[in-house]
Amino acid sequence: MTDVKKYTHKDMASDQEVRWCPGCDDYVILRAVQKALPEIGRKKEDIVFISGIGCSSRFPYYMNTYGMHTIHGRAAAVATGVKLANPKLSVWVVTGDGDALAIGGNHTIHAIRRNVDMNIILFNNEIYGLTKGQFSPTSLLGQKTKTSPFGNTQPPFNPAELALGANSRFFARISGNKPKELTAIFVQAESFKGTSFIEVLQNCVIFNDGAFDLFNSKETRADNQVFVEHGKKMLFGAELNKGLRLKGLELEVVTIGEDGITEEDILTHDAKNPNPTLHFMLARMSNPIVTGVIRAVEEMSFDERFVNQVEERIKLSKGITFDDLVNAGETYMLD
Amino acid sequence: MDTKLSNISSNEIGSVVVRFAGDSGDGMQLTGTQFADTSALMGNDIATFPNYPSEIRAPQGSIYGVSGFQVQIASEIISTPGDDLDMLVAMNPAALKTNLRDLAPGKMLVLDTDAFSRKNLKKAGYDTNPLEDGSLESYRVIAAPITSLTKAALLDLGMQAKAMDRSKNMFTLGMIYWIYGRDMKHTIDFFKRKFKNKEIIIEANTRALKAGNVYAENLELIATTYQVRPAKLKKGKYRIIMGNQATAWGFIAAANKAEKELFLGSYPITPASDILHELVKHPEFKVKSFQAEDEIAGVASTIGASFAGDLAITTTSGPGLALKGEAIGLAMIMEMPIVIVDVQRGGPSTGMPTKTEQSDLLQAMYGRNGESPVIVLAASSPSDCFDMAFEAARLALEHMTPVILMTDGYIANGSEPWLIKKLSELPEITPRTVRKDPEGWSPYIRDKDSLAREWAYPGMEGFEHRVGGLEKNMETGNVNMDPNNHEAMVKIRAEKVKRVENYIPELEVEGAQEGELLVVGWGGTYGALHTAVMSMAGQGKSVGLAHFKYINPMPKNTAEVFTRFKKIVVCELNEGQFVKILRGEFPEHKYFKYNKVQGLPFTGSELIARYDLLMNSEVTV
């Protein structure tokens, strides 16, 4: 793509005033996307952002690309139509935990299982923001919200389990307050052929402030979050002396230098292993949580299969016309 | 019973209506289709009406497993599969039980005596055998042991008994071909194509067909044979077309004309699925058919494809239209060109999926939140589905709005001869694609006449823009919640749809052009209304027909047409939905209404009876 002009993040910003609450992680994610796009080597007019409904879904209005702010829960289905109509486009879905996992759960799992080549960014803040503070399908058991004043009685989804259960080929999880890591993950997601599902742990400063503090704050992050990278040891901790190893059918945290543990004992991350068992185990960990690209197994995308079939039939049909169609088979003359 | 006549005389008659009824596994649809196709090839006009159960394979011999296929063949132009049966073919007691009420005394009844076992009689709810209890005496019964005769004909082929049974429908068809003087060649050719490389099946069916034919010829029970002369259809090249197939082809033609790729986002639903089945077969025309995870994803993907620049359509039936409502509202406020086809069926809720009705009209007109008018069209016959699908696509692409096209189970599954159209004969379609320089462009700049906005899509440099479901500034298209702007936008969007009246044909009146009674209908009832009105007009009665294919907006001359008649009767297969709209739009007129909600089409005779009553009475609304 030599003819693509060099963009900066400013080229990606529309003239609309950004209207999220001050301090919201959404600003960080928006900026990270705007910084990632100049790196993907695509023309601005070939990029499309599709969103549903919710705070995050205002996102397309702030992008100087093509964009559509659709209806609640349907972004993934709309985006599938965009991609099938024009598979050359770079298609992004911006959605939230209510939009993608409650009202739009069906479209989310089907987009993932089909493996449409697009990037789904899930802004998971474990709460409903735009409707002002009701629990969401990722809110914790016991969590007090406007619709659960005595504590939430509905057990949550783990978005990673849902995605992997739908045969997600690319799943990443990342903190909403780490701009560089976000940008890097978005660039990786775009270069991956197929559905890239990225769960961003996004803090809602108004209705669920501090939900991810343990994993996201500077003070506690190092000891409570394992950032995995393909081919590298699963190490974490302020001193990078802790790691994950397999014990039976469980993952356990061990410390190098204790009980004879050496770096050799620590698992090496293989995001490309088609067997998702270990990816599930990583995704299920709650303390520490695992971030980074947990799974990235390439397989032909749905849109490619779809387009190949159409093109194959066009080739076989040898320039058939509409008039051929209506005159084929049984016809008869009346005179 | 008329069983003693031995003279064989050949009568020439204008039309014949035959209904084939049997178990849903008996192959009645195929038998009826062969009878219709053969007759069309012999120059008759034909109209068919399949009436099948919603169970795929209901228990054998049961009442609810009965499948029917009605055919009218005629030497004149016809518009319906006929009201009054000349012949009923009943392959078992259940088929007899459920269909006999539609057969007038004196008409022909063909029965397979082998099927009248005690078990089958019980399943059909007969206490005594109607073959023996005298209850069929008023009919001209042709009772033959069809199953055993078929087996006898196939005996030396070495087939299993069950496999031989399957040819009994062809034995029956052979009998009927002889009665109505049909040529067997077409059907034998059909076997050769259909069962290519299965020699034994071709042989079995051919033998059964011929055996039935010879049996009928030799059988002195059949006293009168009929010949139906060719109809005076317009000269040209024809094919038999079904409504759903015509709809699918109309969109292929429209995409071709508009130089667009066709995208279909759909979820299977009776009776609309055949449009999807047809379009999936044609990727060679750059048709992209996507079977979605649900109805909502069907329309949502359609909106996505439209945003990306395709001619994008979705197909459904009543319950699916309900699910699509919110998304249609989105397409409406974004002013995206999409077409939604609603093949109506009996409602409410799941209702009667395989039966016809016109009860989705108000849903199509008003079934969305907010002020959200869209174009609503309705096709009037199986072949008209082609024209109206083409028209729906044209109006969507040229006026930048969703269009709902209403058909129904009756015309969708019905078939008739179609004078094949050439692509070059069809009207041009000019999508509202942006052509100008992007400088100063915004997505909601409008054409001053049609008020349609311009269409720019991803891949077009310099036209990057955002659209969405939020209210937008009337000039820039940016999100805007200003009260006056909102009111202005609501009015502009409505006015845009209203002005489509300047781009559609005027309402035509058939029969009397003015006078006593104006019959008003819309959509798939055209055949029955036309037959009734023309028959009365032919007798010099002052009756005219105004049939609507454009529901929103209505043709510009509608009010003027209404003033030419003393009485107006609005006939619909619902409880009175179009009449409600007319009463709101043209309150200066009084409207009678005639409604039927039985899951069945109108019959000409019931319409004529009602019109006579209305014309001869002083009743007012």
Image (spheres, coloured by chain):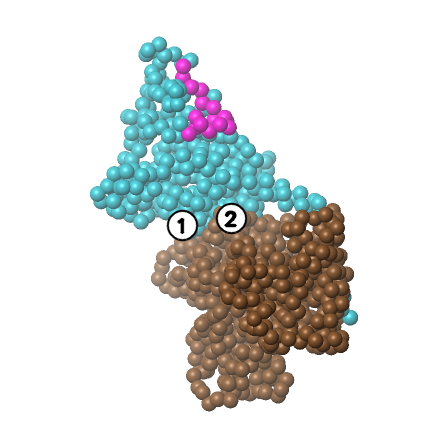
Chain colours: A cyan, B brown
The numbered disc on residue B6 is none
How far across and how far down the image is residue A206, in percent? 27, 42
Which residue is at a point 34% across and 44% down the rendered structure image?
Answer: A20
- Taking depth in this image into account, of B240 and B163 the one nearest to the observer is B163
Residue B86 as seen in the image, left or right of residue B495: right
Q: Residue furthest top?
A: A260
In the picture, residue A306 is in which quadrant?
Answer: top right
Q: Specify the segment rendered in magenta.
A: A265-280
The numbered disc on residue B292 is 2
Which residue is at a point 49% across and 47% down the rendered structure image?
Answer: B293
Amino acid type at mark 2: Ala
Question: In what element is the residue under mark 2?
Answer: loop
Question: In what element is the residue under mark 1?
Answer: loop
- Taking depth in this image into account, of B343 and A178 the one nearest to the observer is B343
Amino acid type at mark 1: His
Q: Main secondary structure of the magenta part?
A: loop
The numbered disc on residue A72 is 1
